[in-house]
Image: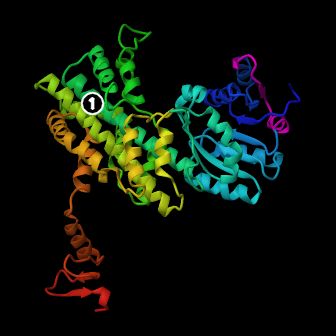
Amino acid sequence: MADALYDFGMIGLGVMGSNLLLNMADHGFKVIGYDKNPDKTGTLESSAKKGTIVKGVNTLAQMISQLQKPRKLMMLVPAGNPVDSVIAELIPLLEEGDIIIDGGNSHYIDTLKRITFLKEKKLHFMGIGISGGEQGARVGPSIMPGGDIEAYKQVEPILKAVAAKVNEQPCVAYLGNDAAGHYVKMVHNGIEYAIMQLISECYDVLHNGLGLTNDELHTIFADWNSGEMKSFLLEITAEIFLKKDDKSENRLVDMILDKAGAKGTGKWTSEAALDLPEPIPTIDMAVMMRNISALKEERINANNLYNPGLKKINISKEDLIQQLHDALLFATVASYAQGLSMLAKASVLLKMQIPLPEVIRVWTGGCIIRSSLLNMFGKAYEKNPQLQNLLLDEKIAGLLKSKLESLQKVVTIALLHNYPVSALSASLNYFNAYCREKLPTNLIQAQRDYFGSHTYERVDAAGIFHTDWEQDDKTVDHSSGH
């Protein structure tokens, strides 16, 4: 076995790396994994199914020497400096035409730099987004590759074999040029942030506003997951409410501190959207709310200072539950719309050529944001591949119109009772602004021109204008040179 030439190598045998490698072995590929920790390489080998070919080694040189050429290997290590450190170790060991894949959540800008750097070394480099968590890696993740098309063709059979399957189609596709794979995964995570925040806001109103128990919450979210919003995040949310704490008599969800962690991809999504620019306020607010959650001591002090109190909501329980369902559906669609619009713009401005119908198909299985709603989104892009925003699709417009009043009522009721429904509010404000033919931004342009001579356009004439606001009738038409 030691002399066998392996099909694929993995650097980093954490749970994700080892599970993905075992998944490949289950599909008939001979795989080898590297980790400095002998315990991890031992666990990898002992976890392999009988009849599969899986090997663990503790030096990179051992792994590289046993890979078939061109060598195909993936890094699943923390983003940032660890990726560059591994690349530096690999370069002396590899040969022209070998393929390095970064399967972690790297910033797409770093991926662009690495592509250029390794191209000069005559090495292929790809950024691939992988979603589905530990379980997905083992039985079928959603895989988002981009960049080097020649390298993709080499690894495509392996990726298709291990990816999640929906209607017998693998949830993997080539998603565009350069760092497109990591860019798509970044936006995927931004949408994930938004939907998780929206669900938490609904939970807050149901639990604290209506006083519902965890058993009742389980029933509601399980019911929502059985309908038009069926999704992985609703499914696990329903399950969470039933989990008992092994250290107390309570449910585990009630014992978890209200401070959310973050690994940076949500922030990167917001930053990248500002750079385009493309408005994604629901995603932005989800990132901000995690930041606010981290201010636990300050929040305790502010609560003691202002004593705002959470008011019980005394309206029909059945009515509010239905309104929350409809509000969540509306805001979830808005979150996807914002993320996909961002991809559409990045595809053009960053020359990534991202195929949105394929992105949606890849997201239908294996990934964290998989949802039955994606089927409707896919049909919208099939009907109009140049669709700028899902909100401009007639069928989706009909759905949102039917849910709009519920979102309005939920936001109003929640705010009047001191519940911070920031993502729900952002979704409503996004919709209200996006659907306005005329916004009050004309006043902002007047202000900018007043204090900074930034000029403005007019509604009744072409050209660029500037006014001396402190003197009468001193308007300058820059377009005509006056």
- What x and y, as percent, mark residue 279? 35, 55
**Quadrant of res 157:** top right
**Quadrant of res 37:** top right
Compare residues 315 and 8 and report the one nearer the observer: 8
- The answer, for residue 80, to whether it is visible in the render is no
Residue at 39%, 55% in the rendered image: 384
Q: In the image, is 392 to the left or to the right of 73?
A: left
The residue under label 1 is 202
- What x and y, as percent, mark residue 450? 23, 76
Task: Look at the image and say whether residue 50 sits in the magenta stretch.
Answer: yes
Q: Quadrant of the N terminus?
A: top right
Q: Quadrant of the C terminus?
A: bottom left
Q: Amino acid at mark 1?
A: Cys
Under circle 1, the secondary element is helix
Reply above or below: 52 against 268.
above
Residue at 39%, 34% in the rendered image: 372
Q: In the image, is 128 to the left or to the right of 476?
A: right
- The answer, for residue 415, to whether it is visible in the render is yes
Q: In the image, is 94 to the left or to the right of 313?
A: right
Q: Residue furthest top?
A: 249
- What x and y, as percent, mark residue 299? 30, 34
Compare residues 147 and 182 and report the one nearer the observer: 147
Compare residues 64 and 381 and report the one nearer the observer: 381
Which region shows up in magenta? 47-67
Reply above or below: 392 against 224.
below
Residue at 31%, 86% in the rendered image: 479
Q: Residues within 10 Å of mark 1 (few under 14, many from 20)?
A: many
